[in-house]
Image (cartoon, helix red, strand yellow):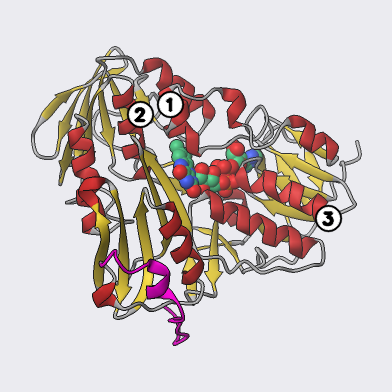
Amino acid sequence: METPHCGLLIVGAGHAGSELAVAARQGGWTGRIVLLGEEAGVPYQRPPLSKAYLLGKSDVDSLALRPASAYEAANIERVQGARLVAIDRAAHRVTLADGSTLVYEKLALCTGGRPRPLVCEGIDAAHPPTNLFYLRTLADADGMRTALRPGARVVVVGGGYVGLEVAASARGQGAVVTVLEAQPRVLARVAGPEVSRFYESVHRDAGVEILTGTGLARVECEGGRIVAVQCSTGQRLEADLVVAGIGMLANIEAARDAGLVEQGGILVDELSRTADPDIVAAGDCTVQHHALYGRQLRLESVPNALEQARAAASWLCGKPKPNHSVPWFWSDQYELKLQMAGLSQGHDRCVVRGNPEARSFCAFYLLGQRVLAIDAVNRPADFMQVRRALAQTPSVDVDRLSDESIPLKDLLAGTAVVTGKP
Ligand SMILES: Cc1cc2nc3c(=O)[nH]c(=O)nc-3n(C[C@H](O)[C@H](O)[C@H](O)COP(=O)(O)OP(=O)(O)OC[C@H]3O[C@@H](n4cnc5c(N)ncnc54)[C@H](O)[C@@H]3O)c2cc1C
């Protein structure tokens, strides 16, 4: 049988894949576009899975990135339940898990990631406990939503964004929640101590027990279910469900075998091009050389997936628009919207503007006078201003930054400096 020829074959129908398909069509790709993915259904948004959807405040239809009719209208062929396992770059051919093959002219890898598995005494990886949950897919969220009921004792392993969002949503469902965080503070990898302290107090006020400096030593199972966890501190907690939010592993096995992986991701440039002129990649599975920072970055966020997808489409359509966007992210917990822009790594000072007790403030991460990053809690206007300014490595009057009688725009206005990389 002749191998089907796909024109543009996009593998992975998540945020990046869906965007790339539509952007390529809009950008003028006239050939076939095939959007192939492992999951069933219309490509959907992941962020609500730990937020409104887990809380039961939104339904499955509201998760769709775009309606099925949008793909039809753009003549994008969707192939569901299909898994790529190998890439033959020389032959421009991919092999799927069922043994079938597809030929491409251009290939886009948008395979995202999967949860990092919890490894500890008491967990048999081949037969994981039935009440151990991860959160990446709609199926994961549905499983967790069913198990979450008022009074359920939930142990969340990992005090990062996903762990804390699950904790807030589980609390909202009336569960009794404990968060274990091995680091001395929550959000240690992504936020400064001021913001970590704020979120710890918010969660404690909401009735969540936060145990920092506390790892998971082992789990006790009965009948294939976890009944208790033993902490590194010796504390024992009974549990009805355990949620692991300990990070992500990129889905890069086929790309690695094809020689496209460096530093744990598919290496791309600002046009999302890999080392192969006929293969682009976008989203969580990539590592990008970022011109703004002069180094390779691994970003796991929706905005990054979308920007990289658009850059890839622009290149494929012969109208290259490089992605130089400032990294940004958001997290919703309780009634708080946290928005972050820039990278705080390397800051020597953090200045808070606003009042954490009033639950409305910004944390500015500074290196000397230069703003490297901002975390804004319930301050969307400030966030937008600073995010825009960050593209030009802005400096501020640090001594007046916390003075709210001076408008932020006056502190940032005309202060852009272009003295090298942050
Ligand atoms: C619970 C949760 C909450 C989040 N909250 C936020 C947030 O508030 N803000 C934010 O910016 N980001 C958030 N993120 C991160 C964000 O969802 C990801 O950065 C984004 O989904 C990345 O898009 P992607 O297209 O690269 O990967 P994905 O959306 O993961 O899509 C990849 C797709 O590829 C498929 N696939 C993988 N391997 C193969 C293969 N070999 N063959 C075929 N198909 C394959 C997968 O099944 C998947 O459907 C959250 C993530 C999670 C899990």
Q: Residue at x 61, y 44 (%)?
A: 15
Q: Earlier in the sequence, mark 1 or mark 2?
A: 1
**What's the distance in space between the residues labelled 3 and 1, CA to CA?**
40 Å
Horizontal and vertical percent for residue 87?
70, 51
Residue 97 higher or lower than 401, as above or below:
above
Tell me whether circle 2 and circle 3 mark residues in contact (CB < 8 Å): no
Q: What is the span of residues highlighted in magenta in the rendered image?
A: 403-422
Q: Earlier in the sequence, mark 3 or mark 1?
A: 1
User: What residue did someone put label 3 on?
Assistant: 105
Tell me whether circle 1 and circle 2 mark residues in contact (CB < 8 Å): yes
Q: Residues within 10 Å of mark 3 (few under 14, many from 20)?
A: some
Which numbered dot is residue 54? 1
Horizontal and vertical percent for residue 337?
39, 44
What secondary structure is found at the residue carrying circle 3? loop
What secondary structure is found at the residue carrying circle 1? helix
Amino acid type, label 2? Ser
Q: Quadrant of ligand 1?
A: top right
User: What residue did someone put label 2 on?
Assistant: 169
